């Protein structure tokens, strides 16, 4: 098909364009379009890319994160297992609890009654001791009367010296029996007062070990009393860590109920022997201020600083990368915002992050996320955890 057939009215165009000229025209058009595309690509490649956003932060002092952490319970420094004192009169007495006067959690004062035994048996024993004393006193009086009769007869030689010595010895024995009966009676009277169990100090009742109607033996624990005053945390320390502790070691104490609030304390007591079952050592930690201590029985964490914890720095695990087989972090230049790799020494890997003993300081800015996408010398746009721009 020719141009003349396509456009018979345009005789000028038909006569001017031949098949050869059409091919030439098409080639020129293709070259022009290709040149325009190349010019467009070249201009687009020349446009610089905007800096990549990068999350940055300062390393922080390792502090408690680099410390050894032990869990324990809050206890009173002095806890007493209180029971009835009902041994006496040469035998053991088992008493029946008649009344319990306190409950767990009650605060009691010194001398306050806590429980009472049925006193009938002890009262009967006191009555028996009283009767024995009366009998001993009667025997002593009889022996004294015999002595008084024999003394003047001996002066007149009406009785022999042997007879008088016998009467004198009987008087001494009767007097000794009276003294013995008096002591037994006094003990029996004291026993009647032991039917009431009283608090020996002011404090808090933490446990009840016997109930009304139960028969208890002498010294059997009936209630547990935590004295008012000093409070402590009891922790268990494994064998391989106990050597780093000694009495007076400063620690930080944090209550589980008040996370983030740390109190000062000291190691007060270390058990000299490991527990036979757990193979751990019992350690008691006292509070610097007992008034700030948590409530009895609450869970607490004890932080014991490791050697070098003050100088170590803590960084997120996501900030670490690798350079020639060694740990490294990206440090940001505060003027150009360009990043560079800095080799670091990892002291320990913790749940909170990695603690570094060298390589970066608290004033450095480091990239904490996306470190595998960065290049040496690349400029970044620093942002914080809330995606806000940061001025370095």
Image (spheres, rainbow, N blue to C red):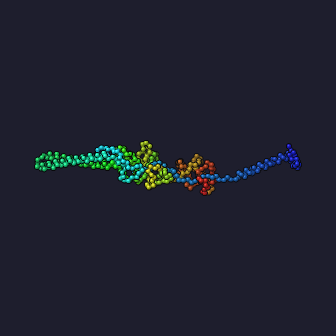
| Residue beneath the point at 60% across and 56% down | 390
Residue lying at the far top of the rendered structure: 277
Q: Is residue 377 among what the camera can see?
A: no
Which residue is at 14% across, 48% downward? Answer: 150
Q: 167 left or right of 295?
A: left
Horizontal side, residue 163 vs residue 370: left or right: left
* Relative depth, front residue between 93 and 260: 93
Question: Measuring 36% from the left and 44% from the top, which residue is drawn there?
Answer: 213
Q: Quadrant of the C terminus?
A: bottom right
Q: Nearer the viewer, residue 263 or 95?
A: 95
For the question of whether residue 196 can be seen, the reply is yes
* Above or below, comparing residue 93 to residue 109 in the picture: above
Q: Quadrant of the N terminus?
A: top right
Q: Position of residue 97 (x, y in %)?
A: 35, 46
The total number of labels drawn is: 0
Place of residue 149 in the rendered image (x, y in percent of width and height, measured from the top left): 14, 49
Query: Residue shown at 41%/54% (left/top)?
Result: 229
Foreground residue among 305 and 385: 385
Residue 316 location (% of width, % of height): 56, 50
Q: Position of residue 94 (x, y in %)?
A: 33, 44
């Amino acid at each position: 098909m020719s141009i003349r057939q396509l456009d018979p009215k345009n005789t000028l165009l038909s006569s001017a364009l031949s098949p050869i000229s059409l091919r030439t025209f098409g080639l020129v058009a293709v070259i022009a379009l290709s040149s325009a595309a190349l010019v467009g690509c070249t201009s687009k490649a020349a446009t610089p890319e905007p800096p990549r956003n990068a999350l940055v932060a300062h390393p922080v002092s390792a502090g408690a994160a680099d410390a050894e952490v032990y869990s324990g319970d809050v206890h009173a420094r002095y806890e007493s297992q209180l029971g009835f004192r009902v041994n006496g009169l040469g035998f053991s007495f088992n008493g029946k609890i008649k009344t319990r006067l306190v409950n767990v959690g009650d605060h009691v004062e010194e001398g306050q009654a806590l429980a009472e035994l049925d006193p009938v048996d002890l009262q009967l024993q006191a009555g028996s001791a009283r009767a024995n004393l009366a009998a001993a006193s009667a025997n002593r009086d009889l022996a004294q009367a015999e002595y008084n009769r024999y003394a003047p007869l001996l002066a007149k030689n009406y009785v022999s010296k042997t007879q008088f010595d016998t009467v004198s010895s009987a008087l001494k024995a009767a007097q000794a029996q009276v003294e013995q009966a008096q002591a037994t009676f006094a003990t029996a009277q004291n026993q009647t007062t032991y039917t009431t169990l009283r608090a020996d100090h002011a404090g808090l009742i933490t446990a009840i070990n016997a109930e009304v109607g139960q028969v208890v033996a002498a010294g059997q624990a009936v209630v547990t009393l935590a004295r008012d005053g000093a409070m402590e945390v009891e922790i268990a320390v494994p064998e391989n860590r106990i050597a780093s502790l000694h009495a007076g070691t400063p620690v930080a104490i944090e209550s589980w109920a008040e996370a983030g609030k740390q109190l000062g304390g000291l190691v007060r007591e270390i058990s000299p022997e490991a527990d036979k079952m757990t193979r751990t050592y019992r350690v008691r930690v006292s509070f610097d201020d007992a008034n700030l201590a948590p409530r009895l029985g609450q869970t607490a964490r004890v932080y014991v600083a490791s050697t070098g914890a003050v100088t170590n720095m803590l960084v997120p695990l996501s900030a670490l990368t690798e350079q020639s087989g060694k740990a490294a972090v990206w440090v940001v230049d505060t003027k150009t915002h360009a990043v560079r790799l800095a080799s670091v020494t990892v002291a320990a890997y913790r749940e909170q992050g990695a603690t570094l003993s060298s390589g970066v300081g608290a004033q450095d800015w480091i990239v904490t996320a996306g470190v595998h996408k960065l290049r040496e010398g690349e400029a970044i746009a620093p942002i914080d955890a809330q995606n806000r721009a940061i001025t370095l």
